[in-house]
Amino acid sequence: MYLDRILFPVQTLGPGNRAVLWTAGCSKHCPGCANPELWHTDGRKSYAPETISRILHQMHLDQKIDGITISGGDPLEQPEELLALLEQIQEITQDILVYTGYTLAELEQLPHFSAIRQQIAVLIDGRYLEQQNQISAVLRGSLNQKIHYFRPEYQPVYEAYLAEGRKIQNIWMGTQLISVGIHNRKESSA
């Protein structure tokens, strides 16, 4: 699985202290994308889902993981690897949130999605549309993106989280400061 980074604890991409994984590889290339550096897999190392699972299990032993968020890139462009990973991390938490640029209707046509759907609690779908990036789109980059609850028991927790509004968290990764969360659209100065 092409993976760019894992950060923990993150409180800006779902409720609680979350481990957040950013996959590499996305063919959609949405204008204004927050992570265009994750579009390509060229020159990137691929990790076995078992390796990523071991890292997450160790994190969970060191400090409890409340939830896991998988973003990108687009993790659904690696469906077999994603499914293998999801099956291995269920005992850490079943609060797994996945972001994708595909719509749910498109995903339902893809092989492996039925099995993937059974492994995740929440899916946020749809391409990023910069002109629809509104502050009211909490947990979403743009208003067209939809939140799907596949495990209804998590819906009240997410709704309480959504009521708090957008959040940004700055995290040091080595010597680099990374700003994590859903950012507001950059206004052009004309």
Image (tube, grey):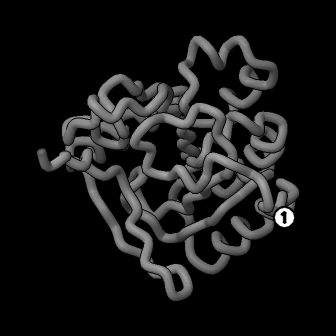
Number of marks in the rendered image: 1
Q: Position of residue 58 (x, y in %)?
A: 72, 74
Name the outermost residue toward the front: 190
Q: Is residue 50 left or right of residue 166?
A: right
Q: Quadrant of residue 63?
A: bottom right
Above-or-below relation of 184 to 50: above
In the image, 11 versus 171, the foreground residue is: 171
Above-or-below relation of 146 to 35: above
Above-or-below relation of 104 to 59: above
Q: Position of residue 89 (x, y in %)?
A: 73, 52
Name the outermost residue toward the left: 190
Residue corresponding to mark 1: 51
Residue count near mark 1 (Cα–Cα under 10 Å), binned few <14, some 14–19, many ≥20: few
State the SS at label 1.
Answer: helix
Q: Is residue 72 left or right of residue 170?
A: right
Q: Amino acid at mark 1?
A: Thr
Rendered residue at 77%/34% (across/down): 79
In the image, 77 versus 113, the foreground residue is: 77
Q: Is residue 39 left or right of residue 142?
A: right
In the image, 120 versus 49, the foreground residue is: 49
Rendered residue at 39%/53% (across/down): 15
Rendered residue at 80%/51% (across/down): 1
Q: Position of residue 131 (x, y in %)?
A: 27, 31
Rendered residue at 42%/33% (across/down): 128
Q: Quadrant of residue 143?
A: top left
Q: Quadrant of residue 75?
A: top right
Q: Is residue 179 left or right of residue 125?
A: left
Task: Identify the image quadrant of the C terminus.
Answer: top left
